[in-house]
Image (cartoon, grey):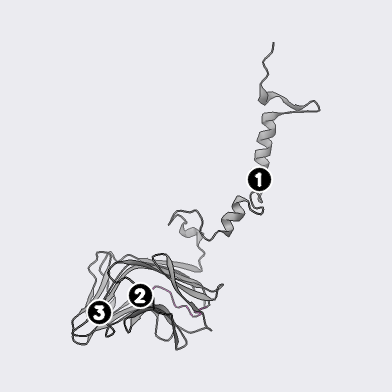
């Protein structure tokens, strides 16, 4: 009695193609089909539509970013030559610190250069930034500004009158969020996302959306600096620590 091997059987009495050959052929056809898995509810369609995709952080290399986009990182591991005044510390330990502690008319400021970020189309291009930060202050006498751009055209966080708020300035008009609940005694991860498609700039702390502001008509900023300053009095204090700064944005080709 002969032993029949399933994979070597003919498909049918009218088709002599072997089963294993048919499987291999169908797999090859599937792999060559550019629309595989793109149907409604299928895996690639769902992957493309997902807000969060399953790539490990940092796994998308720079050659997947067009030459019109920039990614900027600064982990402050070497002392810099940034312009600053007052009590600013750049020790090369991965942080920059501003500390005004019981100083008469205390004021400290640092301007951190952001290469090639003269975004003349603000706020008409997407911008993303993230940093680790520590903000602490004593009372309504103290101020902290973390601002990308300038007072006329820029965005960031601001502490004023004892409250933390998100800020957006366009053509000399400044818009603030409501007061943001904030724990002053720990480090936090701050993220800011400007979405032209949504028409909003979003502000996150530790992954939670804490504020959003409507975008307004085009400004004319010089985004070559990130400006941080603190101010306090002889009976108060204000301090900021910045680390792990990351940004991505489009270039202006003008």
The part of the image, by quadrant, that contains residue 91 is bottom left
The part of the chain drawn in magenta is: 114-123
**Residue sitting at 29 percent across and 72 percent down?**
184
Q: Is residue 195 on the magenta stretch?
A: no
- Kindly identify which residue carries mark 1: 32
Q: Main secondary structure of the magenta part?
A: loop
**Residue sitting at 29 percent across and 67 percent down?**
186
Where 119 falls versus 71 (above or below)?
A: below
Instruction: Say if mark 1 contacts mark 3, CB within 8 Å.
Output: no
Instruction: Say if mark 2 contacts mark 3, CB within 8 Å.
Output: no
Instruction: Say if mark 2 contacts mark 1, CB within 8 Å.
Output: no
Foreground tag (2 vs 3): 3
C-alpha separation, residue under disc 1 versus residue under disc 3: 65 Å
C-alpha separation, residue under disc 2 versus residue under disc 3: 29 Å
**Residue sitting at 54 percent across and 74 percent down?**
196
Left or right: 177 with respect to 84?
Answer: right
Q: N-terminal of the two: label 2 or label 1?
A: 1
**Residue sitting at 46 percent across and 60 percent down?**
62
The answer, for residue 18, to whether it is visible in the render is yes
Where 213 falls versus 75 (above or below)?
A: below
The part of the image, by quadrant, that contains residue 176 is bottom left
Label 1 SS: helix
- Kindly identify which residue carries mark 3: 138
Q: N-terminal of the two: label 1 or label 3?
A: 1
Q: Position of residue 188 (x, y in %)?
A: 34, 67
C-alpha separation, residue under disc 2 versus residue under disc 1: 48 Å
- Kindly identify which residue carries mark 2: 113
Name the residue at the front extreme: 181
Left or right: 57 with respect to 104?
Answer: right
Label 2 SS: strand
Q: Is residue 115 on the magenta stretch?
A: yes
Label 1, residues with CA under 10 Å away: few <14, some 14-19, many ≥20: few
């Amino acid at each position: 009695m002969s032993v029949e091997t399933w994979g070597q059987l003919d498909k049918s009495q009218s088709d002599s193609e072997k089963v294993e050959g048919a499987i291999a052929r169908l797999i090859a056809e599937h792999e060559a089909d550019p629309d595989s898995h793109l149907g409604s509810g299928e895996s690639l369609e769902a992957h493309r539509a997902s807000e969060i995709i399953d790539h490990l952080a940092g796994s998308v290399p720079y050659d997947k970013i067009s030459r019109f986009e920039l990614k900027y990182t600064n982990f402050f591991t070497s002392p810099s030559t940034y312009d600053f005044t007052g009590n600013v510390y750049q020790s090369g330990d991965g942080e920059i610190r501003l500390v005004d502690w019981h100083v008469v008319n205390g004021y400290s400021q640092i301007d951190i250069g952001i290469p090639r970020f003269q975004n003349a189309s603000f706020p008409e291009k997407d911008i993303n930034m993230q940093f680790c930060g520590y903000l602490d202050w004593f009372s309504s006498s103290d101020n902290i500004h973390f601002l990308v751009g300038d007072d006329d055209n820029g965005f960031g966080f601001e502490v004023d009158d004892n409250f933390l708020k998100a800020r957006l300035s366009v053509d000399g008009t400044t818009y603030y969020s409501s007061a943001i609940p904030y724990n002053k005694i720990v480090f936090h991860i701050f993220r800011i996302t400007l979405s032209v498609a949504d028409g909003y700039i979003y502000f996150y702390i530790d992954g939670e959306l804490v504020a959003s502001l409507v975008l307004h008509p085009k400004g004319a900023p010089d985004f070559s600096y990130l400006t941080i300053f603190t101010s306090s009095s002889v009976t108060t204090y204000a301090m900021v620590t910045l680390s792990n700064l990351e940004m991505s944005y489009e270039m202006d080709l003008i």
